[in-house]
Every structure is written in structure tokens, then in C-alpha cells.
Image: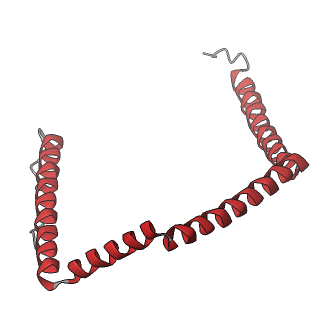
Amino acid sequence: MNEPSGGSTNEEDISEENLTEEFRNLGRNLSEALKTAWEHPERKRIQDEIVSGLNELGTTFRDEVDNFSKSPSGQQIKSDVQEIGDRIRDSQMQARVQQELLNALQSVNAELQKAIERLYSSQTRGTSEQTPPTQTPDGG
């Protein structure tokens, strides 16, 4: 029994070759378009304008920061920030902040572990029982 081939494999080969060639052409054309756009004088002019504008912005910003830091308001803010820094460096405040941070991190980690366990159990329902990795609050 002979199956009618109808040339389908030959047509498929030609079709694949055409697709491959068109993708190559697309890649070359995109590469050339990007290269041409990058080398275009208008792009270079815009880049120069942007660089110049950013340099001017940086200079203006520095000048304004200098002016503000010398102003009475700037001096007051600087003094306030230094005072806050001194308070934080106080050992009791530092210990309290560290303890509160530790408590918050432990709470977040505990909630994340619960969420992981819920997700794990919902994914493994109906499959062999496996236990998710657990961590103790001390990281072990």
C-alpha cells in the first residue's frame, strides 16, 4: 500500500528553509537599522544636548544645596539631624531599636514560614506526604 505523499515533506523543508532565511534577514535588518539609528547625527546631537543639560542640572543642584546648607533653615536642619544622630547613638535607644527590629524580623519570618507551609501543603495534597523545610527563629 502506497501512501500519497503529495510532496508534503518537500514543501515542509522549503517552508522551514524560507522561515529560517526570513529570520536571518530580519536579524540583519534589525541590526542594520539599530546601527544606522545609533550613528545618525540627530541621535548624536540629542545625546550632546542631554549630556549638557544633565551637567547644567548637576551644577545648579550643587549650587542650590550649598546655598540652602548655608541658610538659617539649612543650619537648623543640620543641627536637628545631628541631635537625632546623637540620641540614636545612645546605648539604651540603640538596644531598644535593635530589640524591636529583631522582634519585627522574627514575626515576619514566622508569618512567611506559615505562608510557605500553607502553600506547600496545598500543592502536595493528593501526592505523597513531604514536609517543607523549616527554620527556627535562630536561623537553624
Please tell me whether residue 115 is drawn above or below residue 96 in the rendered image. Answer: above
| Residue drawn at 15 percent across, 49 percent down | 115
The image shows a total of numbered marks equal to 0
Please state which of residues 30 and 67 is positioned toward the viewer in this rendering.
67
Q: Quadrant of residue 96?
A: bottom left
- In this picture, residue 125 sits left or right of residue 8: left
User: Taking the image as drawn, is residue 139 in sight?
Assistant: no
Q: Quadrant of residue 58?
A: bottom right
- In this picture, residue 67 sits left or right of residue 109: right
What colour scheme was applied to this rendering of the protein? secondary structure
Please state which of residues 123 and 43 is positioned toward the viewer in this rendering.
43
Please tell me whether residue 85 is drawn above or below residue 5 in the rendered image. Answer: below
Residue, far front? 72
| Residue drawn at 10 percent across, 66 percent down | 103
Q: Position of residue 110 (x, y in %)?
A: 10, 59
Residue, far right? 41
Please tell me whether residue 11 is drawn above or below residue 136 in the rendered image. Answer: above
**Where's the C terminus, which quadrant?**
bottom left
Please state which of residues 126 and 9 is positioned toward the viewer in this rendering.
126
Please state which of residues 128 and 112 is positioned toward the viewer in this rendering.
112
| Residue drawn at 12 percent across, 40 percent down | 125
**Where's the N terminus, which quadrant?**
top right
Q: Position of residue 51 (x, y in %)?
A: 75, 59
User: Taking the image as drawn, is residue 70 in sight?
Assistant: yes
| Residue drawn at 87 percent across, 52 percent down | 39
Q: Position of residue 21 (x, y in %)?
A: 79, 37
- In this picture, residue 108 sits left or right of residue 29: left
Q: Position of residue 19 (x, y in %)?
A: 74, 32
